[in-house]
Image (cartoon, grey):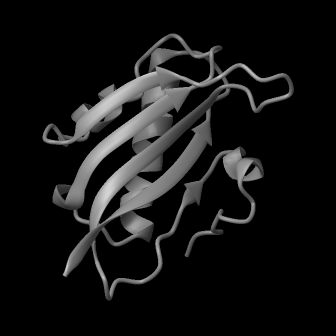
Amino acid sequence: MAKVKAIRGATTVTADTREEILAATRELINEILRRNELHPELVISAFFTATPDLTAAFPAEAVRQLGYTSWAALDSTQMSVPGALQRCIRVLLHVYREETAKEVQHVYIRGAEVLRPDRATAGD
């Protein structure tokens, strides 16, 4: 039986450009799908946040570029907290997951590992 699970992820970019934001977001989504052995049709929604210093593109556009047009995708601005990681894109995916599936793999890449070292995986 499938249950709804949440998968977190984050990445960073070196510059506030449309190309870099979308490329980093596509990379993050692809890595979450790969590490969790997920088929895109099992994704229900993707909630993205970006730090206030990222304004050149909406990260949710990246899922449409990947062809995942049935996903409900939403963008928001991350809170501005002193000392927080800059140029950071976060995502929360809601997915259908079989009870027998391996444990959820949260994905933190491109320096975002510092956000949750307890949950970050080193990859395969």
Q: Is residue 31 left or right of residue 62?
A: right
Quadrant housing residue 40: bottom left
- Residue nearer the viewer, 122 or 75: 75
**Percent of width and height locating residue 48:** 44, 33
Q: Where is residue 99 in the image (x, y as percent from the top left)?
A: 31, 83
Residue at point 62%, 23% (across, down): 51
Image x and y of residue 43, in percent: 25, 54
Outermost residue on the top side: it is: 55
Is 121 on the left or on the right of 66, as rendered? right
In the image, farthest residue toward the bottom: 100
Foreground pick, 101 / 24: 101
Tell me residue 120's x, y (percent).
65, 62
Question: Looking at the figure, which quarter contains the N terminus?
Answer: bottom left
Q: In this view, does 13 lie above or below 38?
A: above
Residue at (71, 19) in percent of width and height: 80
**Which quadrant of the figure contains the C terminus?**
bottom right
Q: Residue at x 59, y 41 (%)?
A: 11
Query: Does 111 sit above or below residue 33?
Result: above
Query: What residue appears at the point 45 percent right and 37 percent down from the top-left corner?
Result: 25
Is the residue 56 above or below the residue 6 in the image? above
